[in-house]
Image (cartoon, rainbow, N blue to C red):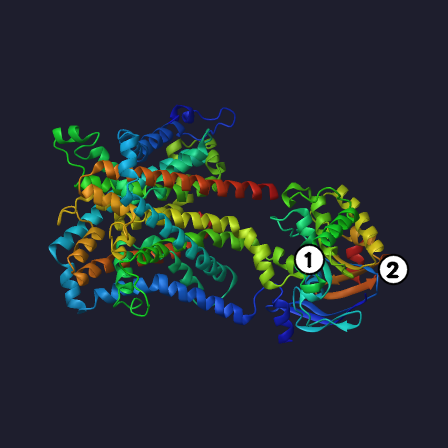
């Protein structure tokens, strides 16, 4: 890391507030110790594997199946969350009704509820004898679709909380403008509102997706964890570790980390573009 | 087209915003609604447009009762105070929006829409800017785009809410002249809201002065100056 | 008159029937996805009555898990609070190159799978890890022991306080601090008497989220703890252990304690959002 360059304050608008050296030093040390060095360890270990071996264990058949379930399930869950997250954000922002604030508070439950608790609860509900499982014509728990159910649960608040402030800031102006130009309500939604909130919706989708890809606790109980069928990538890491296969675990973790960084990059890109667009507007 | 406002009233919560307002506006007139903030002028304009509903009274366009007609079908053009341009659309797409959302056989084809956009850009003196986005325009240019967009469907009535409010003095003067020209050329009946006495008197054929939800006086500028109808009018215009 | 109102409202809103359908759909989805699991936890926990519930909780292993969870939170929350303030002070009150990059680094733990987070520390401190031989030579155990659990928890809760404070402190600017300095206060006095009172609710909010995550973390802790009953099981791990032993009532009983914690967190969080909106960074989590 180019920490030395980062340590130098900007010459021109140097802040007079004291404590820069001390707090920056502590920040760099703590960040390095707790986050950067541990993450670097994963990359360093997997670099030690050599490319051929890395591909063998990191991209094995079983691992590829696990990635497919993790990424495919996350895509499906993020898509479902985009639709219902937008609906919930819309209702919370636009309508006044009894229980609105309570509803808003409960949206954040997946942030607060420990994942293991969510996992066993969802399993109990969607098992064949569970409250919802018995009503459904097809099995959910212990199947790949169970994975998606858990991912929907943990991803929902990301979409709602990302879209909500943008929708609230949108104001009635452009909708009224569309109405005076003859556009009906649905046309206005599709052609005026949706394009305006699309960047936020996309960000929410990406956040929900990223969270679902790495999710472990809420998924493993409901997933069934059958290798090649309902085994997610994080679980495969754990399984490898329990068999003391550190190389396999590290290789898979490296692929997952690379995916996380890519997602982070994409999310920053979307938000950066959006900020620039709005900045010009003002 | 003539506009008749008959005994329109509107209450927000418990506060009365409009208190039995009546106005008769002739075809082709250019009318200013002038008053201090809170006088109800914007509320009146929004009721005429169909963006807000009156609690009582009637609105007639060309003798026809439009009180219950939704805003989409009133055939008006509306220029918003902050322009309310669609940020994700180009200038051309903004201007063509009213034509694109038309239904069935009324909807002009692409070539006709492009022609109309060009006509309107000429009219507001912005040729060549069709590919730009609103964020890339100056305040005065945005205002002109908003005007062109409002005129796309050939409305016979043009309503403007503080159309020059966000502009500096020089641009304001230029646009005033441009707006007056366009009004005369297109043959519109126009109503604009302003709190600026000088602007109202310079631009309008007739000025309606509002205070506390009532019309204090409705007359040509010279008449208001020579014969103010009330103490309020005398204070406000002096 | 009412028809006129209805017509004009349709210009910028939806007709009442559409509204109602959308509200019911949203409520229905929320009930299905969020409320039903929450309700299921309590229903299952009390399925065999209050006394069974009490006995399950009172088991020594469960009590040990509760104790360990409290210890871990009691370490992780203060440590990350202090460092969160330090990081926010650096970033919000000073100018330096690469600030945005720095902020993304602080947020990094949020985008890493908890399992990978746990693995990191196993690779560093495990028997085959970078520091493994040194640690075993000095008879210090990190992996499969409490220090590892604390480290993993610190990692996953790293960003909460800082990311709450950075936007807040940036928005508040530096005027008040600069005023204090001109009045002769030193850096510490400035922080204590000027900055801290201005950020206290935002700080509390960040600590609340840190605590919820610290007590509830599963994946990262699961990888590093070794699941030694009575010793390295936190409450979420105890839930898993009981569940895998088919002791469902027991698992849900412990889960209900954690769900209670989540509810308390939500209540305090909502109360903070209502009463101190101006001092919270808002929707970004």
Q: Which mark is residue B98?
A: 1
**Quadrant housing residue C140:** top left
Which is closer to the viewer, label 2 or label 1?
1
Q: From this view, report whether residue C246 is shown above or below residue C104.
A: below
Task: Classify residue A191 as left or right of residue A17.
Answer: right
- Percent x, y for residue C235? 21, 52
User: Which of the two residues, C247 or C188, is positioned nearer the viewer here?
Assistant: C247
Q: From this view, report whether residue A4 is shown above or below residue B85.
A: above
Query: Considering the image in quadrants, where does the N terminus of chain C appear?
Result: bottom right
Residue A282 appears in the picture as rendered: no
- Percent x, y for residue C109? 34, 41
**N-term mark: 2 or 1:** 1
Task: Classify residue A177 as left or right of residue B176.
Answer: left
Q: Residue at x 65, y 45 (%)?
A: B134
Q: Residue at x 30, y 43 (%)?
A: C156
User: Which of the two residues, C186 or C113, is positioned nearer the viewer here?
Assistant: C113
- Percent x, y for residue B177? 82, 48
**Quadrant housing residue B188:** bottom right
Residue annotated with mark 2: B223
């Amino acid at each position: 890391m180019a920490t030395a360059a980062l340590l130098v304050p900007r010459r021109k608008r140097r802040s007079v507030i004291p404590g820069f050296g001390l707090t920056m030093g502590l920040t760099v040390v703590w960040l390095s110790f707790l986050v950067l060095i541990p993450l670097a360890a994963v990359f360093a270990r997997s670099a030690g594997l050599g490319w051929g071996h890395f591909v063998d264990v990191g991209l094995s058949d079983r691992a590829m199946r696990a990635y497919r379930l993790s990424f495919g399930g996350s895509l499906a869950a993020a898509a479902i969350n985009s639709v219902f997250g937008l609906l919930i954000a819309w209702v919370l922002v636009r309508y006044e009704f009894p229980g609105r604030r309570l509803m808003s508070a409960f949206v954040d439950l997946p942030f607060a509820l420990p994942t293991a608790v969510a996992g066993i609860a969802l399993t109990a509900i969607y098992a064949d004898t569970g409250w919802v499982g018995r009503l459904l014509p097809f099995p959910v728990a212990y199947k790949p679709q169970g994975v998606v159910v858990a991912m929907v649960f943990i991803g929902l608040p990301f979409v709602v909380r990302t879209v909500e402030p943008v929708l609230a800031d949108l104001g009635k102006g452009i909708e009224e403008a569309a109405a005076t130009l003859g556009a009906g309500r649905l046309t206005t939604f599709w052609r005026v509102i949706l394009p305006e909130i699309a960047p936020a919706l996309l960000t929410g989708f990406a956040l929900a997706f990223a969270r679902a890809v790495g999710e472990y606790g809420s998924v493993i109980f409901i997933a069934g964890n059958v290798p090649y069928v309902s085994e997610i990538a994080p679980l495969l890491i754990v399984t490898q570790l329990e068999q003391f296969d550190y190389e396999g675990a590290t290789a898979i973790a490296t692929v997952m980390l690379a995916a996380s960084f890519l997602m982070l990059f994409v999310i920053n890109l979307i938000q950066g573009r959006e900020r620039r667009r709005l900045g010009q507007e003002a | 087209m003539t506009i008749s406002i008959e005994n329109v009233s509107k209450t927000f919560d418990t506060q009365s915003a409009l208190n039995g307002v009546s106005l008769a506006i002739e075809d082709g007139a250019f009318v200013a609604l002038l008053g201090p903030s809170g006088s109800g002028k914007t509320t009146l304009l929004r009721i005429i447009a169909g963006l807000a509903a009156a609690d009582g009274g009637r609105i007639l366009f060309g003798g026809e009762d439009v009180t219950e007609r939704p805003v989409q079908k009133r055939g008006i053009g509306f220029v918003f105070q902050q322009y309310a341009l669609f940020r994700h659309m180009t200038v051309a797409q903004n201007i063509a929006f009213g034509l694109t959302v038309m239904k069935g056989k009324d909807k002009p084809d692409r070539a006709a829409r492009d022609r109309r956009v060009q006509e309107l850009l000429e009219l507001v003196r912005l040729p060549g800017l069709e590919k730009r986005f609103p964020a890339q325009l100056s305040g005065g240019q945005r205002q002109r785009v908003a005007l062109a967009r409002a005129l796309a469907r050939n409305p016979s009535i043009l309503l403007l809410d503080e159309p020059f409010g966000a502009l500096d003095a020089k641009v304001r003067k230029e646009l005033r002249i441009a707006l007056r020209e366009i009004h005369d050329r297109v043959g519109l009946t126009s109503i604009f809201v302003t709190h600026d006495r000088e602007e109202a008197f310079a631009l309008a054929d007739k000025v309606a002065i509002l205070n506390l939800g009532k019309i204090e006086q409705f007359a040509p500028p010279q008449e208001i100056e020579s014969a103010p109808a009330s103490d309020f009018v005398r204070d406000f215009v002096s | 008159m009412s028809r006129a109102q209805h017509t004009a409202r349709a210009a910028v809103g939806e007709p009442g029937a559409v509204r109602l359908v959308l509200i019911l759909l949203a409520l229905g989805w929320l009930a299905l996805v969020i409320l039903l699991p929450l309700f299921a936890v309590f229903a299952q926990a009390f399925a065999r009555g209050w006394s069974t519930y009490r006995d399950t909780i009172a088991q020594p292993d469960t009590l040990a898990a509760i104790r360990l969870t409290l210890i871990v939170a009691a370490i992780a929350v203060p440590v990350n609070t202090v460092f969160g303030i330090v990081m926010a002070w650096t970033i919000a009150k000073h100018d330096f190159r690469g600030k945005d990059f720095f902020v993304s680094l602080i947020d990094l733990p949020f985008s890493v799978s908890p399992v990978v987070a746990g693995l990191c520390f196993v690779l560093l401190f495990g028997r085959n890890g970078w520091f493994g031989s040194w640690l075993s030579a000095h008879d210090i155990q990190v992996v499969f022991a409490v220090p590892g659990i604390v480290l993993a928890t610190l990692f996953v809760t790293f960003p909460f306080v800082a990311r709450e404070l950075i936007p807040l402190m940036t928005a508040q600017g530096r005027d008040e601090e600069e005023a204090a300095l001109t009045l002769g206060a030193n850096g510490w006095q400035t922080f204590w008497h000027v900055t801290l009172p201005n950020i206290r609710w935002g700080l509390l909010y960040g600590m609340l989220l840190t605590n919820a995550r610290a007590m509830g973390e599963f994946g990262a802790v699961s990888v590093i703890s070794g699941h030694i009953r009575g010793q390295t099981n936190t409450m979420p791990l105890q839930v898993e252990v009981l569940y895998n032993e088919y002791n469902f009532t027991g698992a849900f009983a412990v889960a209900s304690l954690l769900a209670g914690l989540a509810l308390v967190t939500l209540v305090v969080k909502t109360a903070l959002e209502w009463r101190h909106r101006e001092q919270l960074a808002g929707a970004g989590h």
